[in-house]
Image (cartoon, rainbow, N blue to C red):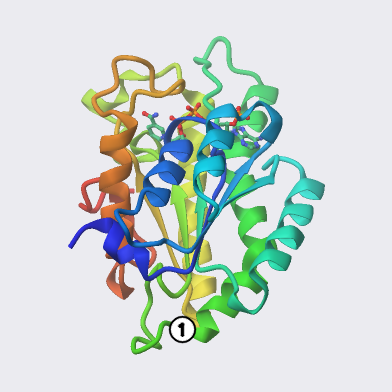
Amino acid sequence: MSSLVSFGKCCSVLVTGASRGIGLQMVDSLAAGGGFSPGKIIATTRNPATAQKLQELANKHPNIHIITLDVVSQESIERCAEEVGQLLQDEGLNCLINNAGINVVADLHSVTADKMMENFHTNAVAPLMITKAFLPLLKRAASRGEAGDSGSMSIQRAAVINVSSLLGSVELNWGEGANNIKWYPYRTSKSALNMVSRCMAKDLEPDGILCMAIHPGWVRTDMGGSEGLLSPEESVSSILSVIGGLSEKDHGSFLNFTGEALPW
Ligand code: NDP
């Protein structure tokens, strides 16, 4: 069964950082759902006016709703949650994908407190604040459950997916894996995101909201660069397949885009 079939049963998906890269590809792939309508796709971007490719997608697919969200602005997060609430009403939000991220490059010599805080804010603090703001909508979706499958955890019911990175793995940052020493801000921000995911998983469990972190692979985007091993299409097709099939056993996990568990 393809990922798009699984996603087809999901009513609403929100993707942050949908202007380009992996986020844009997620919106594209969800909208092109091979005849299986994924329901409402909420594509958020900090500047809709300049997100031309996203605008083109939205013109083609009426189920794409573009909403402004600057993930580091609490005011923007609250405004976005209110707009999404008006759009989704009693349905609630089924799947929140915290994808927006930045990579502030710095080694031991060039790193500063400001660089650390900037990366930490976007990659670790923002997903937490966004999830908090969308909690009432996620709870609403979770309480409705999925027809015929109530009680179980899945993205069709309610889920928070945090797009993390292998570079956030403390265990893998040793020996061979420790070569990328120029990434103090990025690596630590993703380690923090992993812990945020784990903490939230514990807190969201009683409400039946699945929460996990996923590594998208090394992808050819503005962040990943032209040498990346995967095209955005390949990465996203695999990610959607993995998250489309998530269940209770994956709650609180850190998975590769191929579906295998990664070391924390
Ligand atoms: P890109 O740099 O291509 O895109 C980043 C996206 O995040 C853009 O849409 C950007 O919006 C958005 N963004 C950044 N800051 C903010 C903000 N303050 N508010 C709203 N949106 C913001 O990155 P990728 O697509 O490659 O990365 C997506 C995610 O995948 C990130 O979390 C990244 O860490 C993770 N990842 C990527 C890998 C790769 O190889 N590419 C590997 C491992 C993880 P704007 O256009 O407005 O700047």
Q: The residue under label 1 is which amino acid type? A: Gly
Q: In the shown orientation, is residue 176 left or right of residue 173?
A: left
On screen, residue 193 above or below 232: below
Residue at horizontal 32%, vertical 58%?
A: 35
On screen, residue 230 above or below 40: above
The image position of residue 83, as x and y in percent, is 74, 59
Judge: label 1 CB < 8 Å from ligand 1: no
The image position of residue 156, as x and y in percent, is 40, 71
Question: Mark 1 falls on what kind of element?
Answer: loop
The one nearer the camera, 221 or 262, is: 221
Q: In the shown orientation, is residue 35 left or right of residue 46?
A: left
The image position of residue 10, as x and y in percent, is 42, 68
Q: In the shown orientation, is residue 243 left or right of residue 52?
A: left
Residue at horizontal 50%, vertical 68%?
A: 94
Residue at horizontal 47%, vertical 37%?
A: 24
Residue 47 appears in the rendering: no
Residue 141 appears in the rendering: yes
Quarter of the image where one finds residue 231: top left
According to the picture, the residue beneath numbered tag 1 turns out to be 145
